[in-house]
């Protein structure tokens, strides 16, 4: 029995370590995939001429940045800095629009790729505040939380993961809930970790993240 318990604990520990080691690409991939899905839904609701122009200008800058990274030119850093400056102006002038969200999110991605987690965190937080009632806020806050995680600002990460999990229609709530449990566990808050994993199992019984959460519940129960 003791040997079986050790095997369960070892397996779940390896799962958590694997997820922890892959926080960085999760930040980038999440933005790339989910934001594209959000785009068509939100842009269609923008009717004001100014907002449409802002959206087109922002998307043009993002396309320019994407092309720049694909070319990987020697002077890429300087050109990227120039695009960052333009995106910051677009974001600041965008107000509560999808264009502003896109600009802030892209800035977050740029700095995440540079591993400048402080700036990436700041821009992702601003992206979340732009459209707080839309599920895009969940995307932004999740990525902000991952940046805080990288900086070992665990209390801040917990707050941001909680915001992302509370975002209506956010598709990755199970992952956010698992991360809440993972961080609580790393802080030796065993009761709170169990509460998070239990909530995950109750709300999403068939999700893959729930399987990992249940493995952690077993491991915690035998410690």
Image (tube, rainbow, N blue to C red):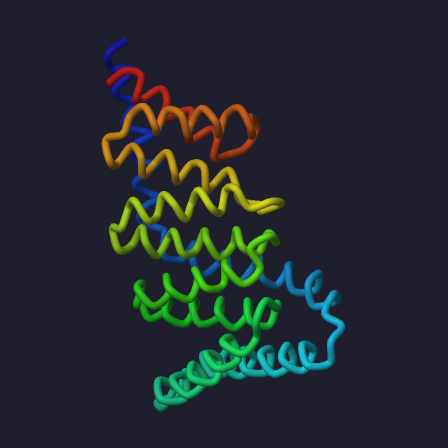
Which is nearer the eye, 86 or 79? 86
Residue 63 point in image, percent of width and height: 56, 79
Q: Is residue 32 left or right of residue 144?
A: right
Which image quadrant is residue 39 in? bottom right
Residue at image location 25% in from the left, 50% down from the top: 152
Residue 10 point in image, percent of width and height: 27, 28
Residue 193 point in image, percent of width and height: 34, 29
Q: Quadrant of the N terminus?
A: top left
Depicted 212 relative to depicted 113: above or below: above
Depicted 176 relative to depicted 132: above or below: above
Residue at image location 60% in from the left, 72% down from the top: 99
Depicted 190 relative to depicted 133: above or below: above
Which is nearer the eye, 33 or 155? 155
Residue that protrudes farthest toward the top in the picture: 1
Residue at image location 24% in from the left, 12% down from the top: 2
Q: Is residue 62 left or right of residue 46?
A: left
Q: Quadrant of the C terminus?
A: top left
Residue 32 point in image, percent of width and height: 53, 63
Residue at image location 59% in from the left, 67% down from the top: 96
Disc count in the image?
A: 0
Which is nearer the eye, 148 or 220? 148
């Amino acid at each position: 029995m003791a040997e079986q318990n050790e095997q369960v604990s070892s397996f779940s520990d390896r799962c958590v370590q694997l997820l922890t080691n892959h926080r960085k690409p999760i930040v980038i991939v999440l933005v790339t995939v989910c934001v594209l899905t959000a785009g068509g839904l939100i842009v269609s609701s923008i009717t004001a001429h100014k907002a449409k122009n802002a959206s087109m200008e922002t998307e043009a800058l993002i396309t320019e940045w994407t092309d720049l990274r694909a070319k990987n030119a020697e002077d890429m850093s300087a050109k990227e800095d120039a695009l960052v400056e333009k995106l910051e102006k677009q974001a600041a002038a965008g107000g509560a629009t999808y264009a502003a969200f896109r600009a802030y999110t892209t800035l977050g991605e740029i700095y995440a790729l540079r591993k400048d987690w402080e700036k990436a965190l700041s821009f992702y937080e601003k992206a979340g505040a732009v459209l707080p009632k839309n599920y895009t806020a969940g995307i932004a806050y999740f990525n902000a939380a991952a940046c805080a995680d990288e900086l070992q600002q665990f209390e801040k990460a917990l707050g941001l993961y909680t915001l992302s999990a509370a975002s209506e229609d956010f598709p990755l709530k199970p992952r956010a809930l698992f991360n809440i449990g993972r961080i609580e566990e790393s802080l030796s808050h065993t009761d709170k970790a169990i509460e998070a994993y239990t909530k995950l199992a109750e709300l999403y019984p068939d999700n893959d993240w729930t399987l990992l959460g249940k493995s952690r519940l077993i491991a915690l129960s035998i410690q």
